[in-house]
Image (tube, helix red, strand yellow):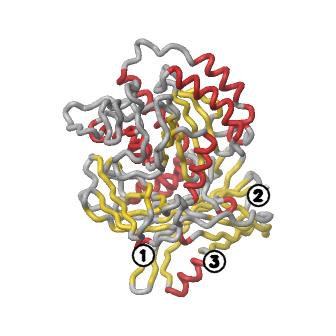
Amino acid sequence: MIKLAFAIALAASGLLAQTPAPSLMYIYPLVFDANGQPVTDLTSADFKIVDQGKPGNIVFFHAPRAQKTAAAGKLEYSNRPGGKTPHAVAILFDLMNESQPDRLDMWHALDKSLPKMESGDSVYFYILTLEGELFPIHPIGPPAADDHNWPQDVAGPLDKAMKTYSHARPAHLGQEDQVKKTFHDLEVLANQLSALPGRKDIVWITGGVQNVYNTKLPCNGDWVDCALYVPHLAVTLAHADVAVNPLSNSRDLVSGVTRYDGQFSSGGDMKAKANANDVFGDQQAGPNAAAGPDPTRDLEQMGRLTGGHAFFRQEVPAVVQQLAADAGNMYEIAYQPASDNWDNKFHVIHINCERKGVKLQSKERYFALPDTRSAAEKQRAAVMAAFQSPYNVAEIGMNVKVSPAQGGIHFDLRIDPSDVMLHEDGGKFTGGLVFFVSDRGASGPLGDPTVSPLGLDLTKAQYDTVMKEGMPISQDHAVGAAVTSVRLMVLDQNSEAVGSVTFPVK
């Protein structure tokens, strides 16, 4: 009832935007120099975006965030501990789309490699069984999330699970069932990850991408446009802000793939062995194929479709470590597509960098599903998700210092202005935030949060100050006997981004 009452109160408050807002497209490119080192000093002027042949107007730009900062002091709290945006990874060992020899090889490789991980913090592990069901070895959420040393003890649970699930492939499971179950389980993992703060990745250990094709659509060697169930997968992953990173150590692969490749074309010298058994590909030879079809092309394309990257012949700890480094080196760009963009079709994104000698890795395609909700409806949904979540939301950085006060507490909050979408016009910087203070007890929220509008109308001097020091909010807050913690939330009305930080009061 509290959540419903809050939603009704929020809808009636009139504080949320009532005018339609344009739908924005977010991409998170990585940029590397000729030596493969990340380039992190570019500006928005260095990027040019073309969406389905039309220029995309960049309305928000964020360079990679600063490196780790000093640990928070006593009674200091942040939704980005150490100054870094949180990052979570779910490892999915896909038995259903691996050959039996590759399943056995990967099983024994994981027994040896996973204990080498420095920490299992924010890393989760599942098996996709031959029946198409998810079996958790180290599941997302509490209490597993509090066990940072689980990789050191993973061999026992993994061996037990593999002895149970590594059997003959079910005869009744056809190709379409296999595709539906695989994509469904990727979506289930993505939806679970979506509740966690920060960037999210799935490491999909698989032998290839199965597909079922729509015979009514043209398919010229590009399964994204003509495969069934792919649009739903792409929309779900984009909504959850989760990238899929395929990993293949198949016996049929030879080494040589590069980290970079052109848009929708295979890169490097990775090829199938002659006469390789390609039971999971699209049965079409890629531009770099040997005597047999190229089993890497579909995996590379799945990575580019979701904003991830395909890995070959690597151990899982090295892949997880690379994804964590990439998460800290990503640019965040929001652009406004053309008004007629949202047409229920796949769109190709071309992103170019004006600086010479660099290479980009980025999401290259998305399904343009219209969002018919009003701006107020989208903002309410974002706030309600943050209100109900057991975790802090880190889209907008927040740091707070807390001190005792008469009848309760006093807090000094700093909001990261680089995460807020401000419009510049004639030397003025304008925007709109909505600020929430929510009391929480042992069982969850207590009563309705207080809701306050924060109109932003900054001079250049004020803008320069807040960019250095953060946007400040300071106030006293009464604390009742049942209150055990307080959650501060802020909504950016221009971008619909949300930040939240929670701290104990008892």
Q: Nearer the viewer, residue 100 or 476?
A: 100
Q: CA distance from mark 3 to mark 2?
A: 25 Å
The residue singled out by tag 2 in the image is 505
Quarter of the N terminus within the rendering: top right
Circle 1 or circle 2, nearest the eye: 1
Q: Amino acid at mark 2?
A: Val
Determine the secondary structure under disc 3: helix
Where residue 109 appears, as percent x and y from the top left, is 63, 30
248 relative to 385, above or below: above
Q: Is residue 18 visible?
A: no
Q: Amino acid at mark 3?
A: Glu
Q: Nearer the viewer, residue 81 or 462?
A: 81
Q: Nearer the viewer, residue 97 or 474?
A: 97
Where residue 479 appears, as percent x and y from the top left, is 73, 60
Q: Residues within 10 Å of mark 3 (few under 14, many from 20)?
A: few
Q: Residues within 10 Å of mark 2 (few under 14, many from 20)?
A: some
The residue drawn where x is 64% and y is 59% is 79
Residue 423's tag is 1
Where residue 334 appears, as percent x and y from the top left, is 41, 63
The residue singled out by tag 3 in the image is 469
Q: CA distance from mark 1 to mark 2?
A: 37 Å
The residue drawn where x is 77% and y is 63% is 75
